[in-house]
Amino acid sequence: MRLSTGIDTIDRTLGGGLQPGSIVALLAPPEAQSLPVLCAHTGLRPTHYFTTLRTVDSVQRQLAQQDLDPKLRRVEHVDLDDALATIDAGLEQLEDGDDVVVDVVDPLERTASMAAYLDLLNALSRRLAETGGVGMLHCLESGREAESPNRELTLSVADHVWRLEPRREGARSLTYYLEIPKANGLPLDENDRVQELDVGSSVQVDRTRDY
């Protein structure tokens, strides 16, 4: 059984969706409309949403604007002073089939020690394997500043790496492309590794959970 990402074109590329227990690292520039891609699955499965930058009200308001009817078990703003402990405690509350979103991971990557951050990633991987959900880690990628010290750990632990890239095509046209540089266990050819997405208030949402 695979779990839908909520985006039909990506599901087809991945053979029906993501394996239960998978972790996805979504890389996107700060100005990109990444929330529809990050949260397309929240209309399909119960989700625990941890936010490091946005307020809870802001997250709930933005998710309400998506055409998803999100199934949120919790939305929690994590204070950086105890972010790792807060998220770790939240992981222990996951129920079977629950998904996890961490938006964004950059402050955790920058402030936590390598050992502490790796412990959190391993705890996330362990809990998702136990409960059969999916984890989405939102990673900012601006190219204007040094990469987070622990970014390499994020990309190494993630089963899938997606890179969302907005491209200006013509004077007014903005097109989004999703590159899939990493997809563990899937022999993707070059044509499958880049997908064009219609990103607006939502993406091409596929409401079928299983394939």
Image (cartoon, helix red, strand yellow):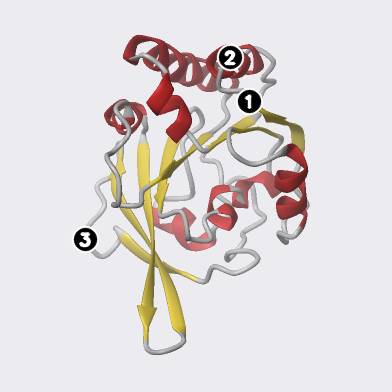
What residue is disc 1 on? 78
- Single out the mark in the foreground, 1 or 3: 1
Crowd rating for badge 2 (residues with CA inside 10 Å; few <14, some 14–19, many 20+)? few
Q: Residue visible at 52% across and 71% down?
A: 198
Tell me the SS state at disc 2: loop
The disc label shown at residue 44, or none: none
* Near-viewer residue (96 or 139): 139
Indicate the position of residue 50 as horizontal and vertical percent values.
Answer: 63, 31
Q: Residue visible at 53% across and 61% down?
A: 33
The disc label shown at residue 190, or none: 3
- Single out the mark in the foreground, 2 or 3: 2
For residue 104, side relative to residue 131 (left or right): left
Tell me the SS state at disc 1: loop
Up the image or down, 19 lies above or below 16; here it is: above
Up the image or down, 106 lies above or below 29; here it is: above
Query: What's under tag 3, amino acid-wise?
Result: Glu
Indicate the position of residue 171 as horizontal and vertical percent values.
Answer: 41, 89
Indicate the position of residue 57 as horizontal and vertical percent values.
Answer: 78, 43
Query: What's under tag 1, amino acid-wise?
Result: Val
Q: Residue visible at 34% across and 10% down?
A: 115
Q: Residue visible at 51% across and 31% down?
A: 20
Tell me the SS state at disc 3: loop
**CA gap, disc 1 and disc 3:** 38 Å
Crowd rating for badge 1 (residues with CA inside 10 Å; few <14, some 14–19, many 20+)? many
The disc label shown at residue 82, or none: 2
For residue 199, side relative to residue 175 (left or right): right
